[in-house]
Amino acid sequence: MPIIVNLDDQLAQHNMTVAQLAQAIGITPANVFVLKNGRAKAVRFSTLEAICRVLDCQPGDILGYES
């Protein structure tokens, strides 16, 4: 898949676990794992906004495109 998810890098920079992020943004840890592992078929803008708010980053810091 050409869309790359760099959530691991952002979590590491903020010393945050998947469980902590899930709690902070109000979704289940299982759903964060699906996104983190690149298996998500879609991401709601509200979820992406919440992740960016909590991790103090931009969407491009989390998502990338690989050709």
Image (spheres, helix red, strand yellow):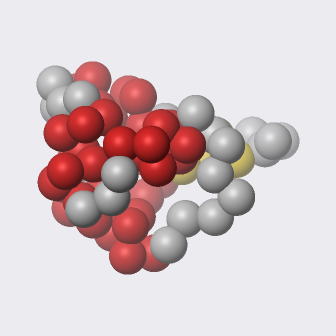
Q: In this view, does 1 lie above or below 43?
A: above
Q: Which residue is drawn at 35% across and 51% down?
A: 28
The number of callouts visible is 0
In percent of width and height, residue 48 lies at 40, 64
Q: In this view, does 64 lie above or below 10?
A: below
Q: Quadrant of the C terminus?
A: top right
Residue 62 seen: no
Is 67 displayed left or right of 65 in the figure?
right
Q: Which residue is drawn at 19% across and 31% down?
A: 16
Is 34 displayed left or right of 2 in the figure?
left
Foreground residue among 31 and 47: 31
Q: Which residue is drawn at 36% across and 43% down?
A: 29
Foreground residue among 14 and 31: 31
Q: Residue at x 64, y 64 (%)?
A: 42
Q: In which quarter of the image is the N terminus?
A: top right
Residue 27 seen: yes
In percent of width and height, residue 24 lies at 16, 54
Query: Which image quadrant is residue 32 in?
Result: top left
